[in-house]
Image: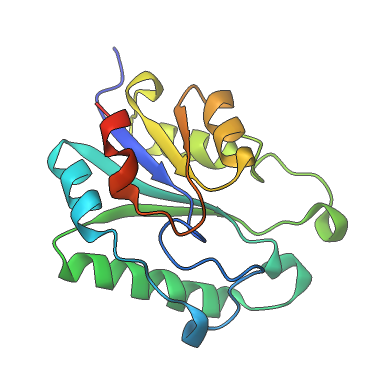
Amino acid sequence: MPAKNKAVFLDRDGVLNQEMGDYVRRLEDFHILDNFEALKTLQDRGYLLLVATNQGGLAKGWYTEEELTKMHSLLKQTYHEHGIEITDFFYCPHHPLFTGDCDCRKPKPGLLLQGIAKYDIDPSKSYFIGDRERDVEAGTAAGVKGILIDSDQPISTVLDQIK
């Protein structure tokens, strides 16, 4: 039986919140970008919204899972207040120099494959919006169309690429 859902996977830093040049380590530095209208449009078109983010700062000990959970809760709550539901967060806590190789760190497709499996997603009808080439590579490897944007570029500027 074919997969029944479609999704837009979203990188986090530089796509949903302001790019800081390095890891966002504290809730006070976590500034959500105004992509509310664009994400509502995608949701209204029937796409699940899933976050896929490398969080190597965890492996480096720069912040804790607890702090990361606070950031993701704030993101989910802020979008919820604008009528947008983020279905789930998938993150890679590894860093090759600290924890060795893994299957989930982008450009590998592990995070997207987790979401595809968990939510019965058809990759051929899905997209991944990211601000790094590794995001597009991860999308391609998972069978999802990657869309590259500049850091902090409004998602509304690429809506025409999502059918």
Q: Given the current orientation, which residue lies at the most extreme top position?
A: 1
Q: Nearer the viewer, residue 6 or 150?
A: 150
Instruction: Give how far across and how far down residue 114 sits, in percent.
Output: 49, 39
Color style of the picture: rainbow
Considering the image in quadrants, where does the C terminus appear? Answer: top left
Q: Nearer the viewer, residue 1 or 43?
A: 43
Using the image, determine if residue 25 lies above or below residue 15.
below
Using the image, determine if residue 125 lies above or below residue 39.
above
Q: Nearer the viewer, residue 154 or 50?
A: 154
Q: Given the current orientation, which residue lies at the most extreme bottom position?
A: 28
Using the image, determine if residue 3 lies above or below residue 60.
above
Q: Residue at x 26, y 29 (%)?
A: 5
Q: Residue at x 55, y 25 (%)?
A: 140
* 114 sits left or right of 63 in the view: left
- Find residue 2 and report its image quarter: top left
Instruction: Give how far across and how far down residue 6 sits, in percent.
Output: 28, 30
Considering the image in quadrants, where does the N terminus appear? Answer: top left
Q: Residue at x 59, y 25 (%)?
A: 141
Instruction: Give how far across and how far down residue 95 sits, in percent.
Output: 76, 56
Instruction: Give how far across and how far down residue 102 sits, in percent.
Output: 74, 44
* 163 sits left or right of 69 in the view: left
Q: Residue at x 23, y 50 (%)?
A: 38
Q: How many marks?
A: 0
